[in-house]
Image (tube, rainbow, N blue to C red):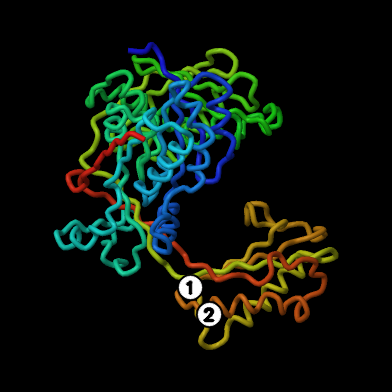
Amino acid sequence: MKSRIRIAAGQGFWGDLPDAPVRQVEEGPIDYLMLDYLAEVTMSIMQKQKARDPSAGYARDFVPLMKRILPACVARDIKVTANAGGVNVAGCAAAVRDVARELDLSGKLKIGIVIGDDILDQIDDLLARGIELRNMDTDEPLATVRDRIQSANAYLGAAPIVSALNQGARVVITGRATDTGLTLAPMIHEFGWAADDWDKLSAGTIAGHIIECGAQCSGGNCQFDWQNINDLANVGFPIAEAAPDGTFVITKHEGTGGCVSVPSVKEQLVYEMGDPLEYITPDVVADFTTIRVADDGPDRVRVFGIKGRPATDFLKVSISYSAGYKAVGTLLYAWPDAYAKAQAADKILRARLERPGLKFEQILTEFVGANAAHGPLVGEPPRDLAEVQLRVGVRGNDRNAVERFTKEIAPLILTGPPGVTGFAGGRPKVEEIVAYWPALIPKREINPRVEVTEV
């Protein structure tokens, strides 16, 4: 058993800094590279891509990344865990396999995949058997939006990833696995933690939670003393340096920008956290009230004392469905009377949208530069603002009504108040609204499958 392992975060979301994973591999010693690509809405985007092209449906930029770093990963014995597979895990793995062969790495590594999270084709059977998949926020049954569902994926835990690593996979590609499981799995694999060692599993889960958003815990998006955070242009992504006893240190490569401090780690700890007593994952229920953090030297924070409880019998399911249409348009008004002009333009626009046959669920107006960020909390804005952007958004089930709105913005330039200096982005575009439906499903209904193949 190793005395410690270093798990480096390389992506906090699909579209994060493209060179961050490369730097994690090249600028210091690591044992694992964890890449988190998926958010709730990402699955529906990938499902649409796959519907248009059966070979699509995964994070395409993961493949050229692997082309850049695979030789170094093989040479330095670095393993990769990534949820880049989206809704086409097999297709993603096949593309990486092709890259590995192109790099003359045949026979030098194995690629593991985890499938079974996508339950879109099982929805009707589940509903027929009385598994209602009720919305966790509203308690509505899924049947109320059945005809509009676009994607449905259960959050898998660390166990299938551990299985792939145990079978010798150097690269493990998953679909909708939990963000934390991508980090917890290497710890279970390396340290042999038992499936019911709740305290250690909680520790690994919290380590994963801290580094899952990339540089957000190493200086990026940090409210504490942000003006004095060094060299964010060269920000170092975080590394969890874990020990077999469940303690770990959050750090980053030497010579990189940003900072790892107690405040930066604490800020990330409260990110997307509900009940601090019950941070529920498929693997364990972690107790955030037991977490202890302490400085451990420059850019090093030690985390310890973590307790956990048994996992539940359910998995969370992320479901997306079509919920109508929206469009957003903007106009920029200049001094003098910029705010008054924008207010007048909003009234004119709303009057023109009150025509028979036009129905909207919501019309939302923001005056950017006056009150968009804080609304009524700032009180009445100054009347002598140099410029104000009128930003109006509409949403509704009637696409024709939303389409009509898109044709009413530009005419305000010549038929409304004076002083328009910018028609940002041209005519607004009608976009489909993708809504989120969280639900729970009994674990017995989900059967993850692991496949490991040699390149």
Q: Would residue 205 be visible to someone looking at this image?
A: no
On the image, the x and y values in percent for residue 21 come to 53, 33
Query: Horizontal placement of 283 versus 400: left or right?
Result: left
Amino acid type of the residue that numbered disc 2 sits on in the rendered structure: Ala
Q: What's under tag 1, amino acid-wise?
A: Gly
Answer whether labels 1 and 2 touch (C-beta < 8 Å): yes
What is the quadrant of residue 204 in the picture? Answer: top left
In the image, is 33 to the left or to the right of 136?
right
In this rendering, position of residue 298 left or right of residue 268? right
Residue beneath disc 1: 396
* 270 versus 128 height, above or below: above
Closer to the camera in the image, 207 or 6? 6
Return the residue at label 2.
Answer: 401
Residue 249: x %, y % from top left: 47, 18
Q: Is residue 116 visible?
A: yes
Query: What residue sits 54% from the left and 76% below the top?
Result: 402
Where, by quadrant of the figure, is residue 381 drawn? bottom right
Q: Give the structural element (helix, strand or loop) at label 2.
A: helix
The single residue placed furthest to the right in the displayed view is 336
Disc 1 and disc 2: Cα gap in Å?
8 Å
Residue drawn at the location 25% of the way across and 56% of the way down: 133
Query: Which residue is at the front of the view, 334 or 56?
Result: 56
Judging depth in this view, the residue of 284 and 252 nearest the camera is: 252
